[in-house]
Image (tube, helix red, strand yellow):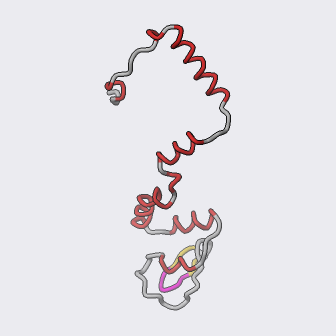
Amino acid sequence: MTHIGCCNHSFPQTAFSCAVPQKCGLPEMSGLCYVWRTMSTVQEIEAAIQALPMTEREKLVEDLPAILPELNGDAAWERILSDARPRPALMALGDEIAAQFKADPNRFSEIQDGDFDPRS
């Protein structure tokens, strides 16, 4: 694989190209000098992430929910709950359970706090 370098850094050519060919003064292997070129495809972004040192990748993993709010579990559930598309199978299941409860409420046991404890 061909590598290109800038500021004494070297990354796969497919991942980056640098608009600042002279030494930029950033720490070796920081990857920061390569931010000058706008990445426009998922493949370019994936390659850039794969080229990061492990410590930088670990920081990225921690920061991703802030960068991509859709990774936040609450936001994902909010999108699901606010989705107006019809769900006939889910509605039919809900109607069936509601009819069963109406016919015999004792068939459904009350939920206890212990029901949420992890099973050993």
Q: Nearer the viewer, residue 72 or 98?
A: 98
Q: Position of residue 81 (x, y in %)?
A: 56, 39
Q: Position of residue 100 (x, y in %)?
A: 54, 12
Q: Position of residue 38 (x, y in %)?
A: 60, 75
Q: Residue at x 42, y 64 (%)?
A: 54
Q: Nearer the viewer, residue 43 or 115?
A: 115
Q: Residue at x 53, y 52 (%)?
A: 70
Q: Compared with residue 81, is residue 11 higher up or lower down, i.e. above or below?
A: below
Q: Residue at x 32, y 26 (%)?
A: 113
For the C terminus, which image quadrant? top left
Residue 115 in which image quadrant: top left
For the N terminus, which image quadrant? bottom right
**Marker count (numbered):** 0
Q: Compared with residue 25, is residue 90 higher up or lower down, i.e. above or below?
A: above
Classify residue 52 as left or right of residue 44. Answer: left
Classify residue 103 as left or right of residue 14. Answer: left
Classify residue 2 as left or right of residue 65. Answer: right
Q: Main secondary structure of the magenta part?
A: strand
Q: Residue furthest bottom?
A: 22
Q: Residue at x 57, y 66 (%)?
A: 47
Report if residue 113 lies within the magenta region.
Answer: no
Classify residue 54 as left or right of residue 40. Answer: left
Residue 11 in which image quadrant: bottom right
Q: Position of residue 52 (x, y in %)?
A: 48, 68
Report if residue 8 lies within the magenta region.
Answer: yes
Q: Residue furthest front?
A: 102
Residues drawn in magenta = 5-9
Residue 79 in which image quadrant: top right
Q: Nearer the viewer, residue 66 or 30?
A: 66
Q: Nearer the viewer, residue 4 or 120?
A: 120
Q: Compared with residue 60, is residue 115 higher up or lower down, i.e. above or below?
A: above
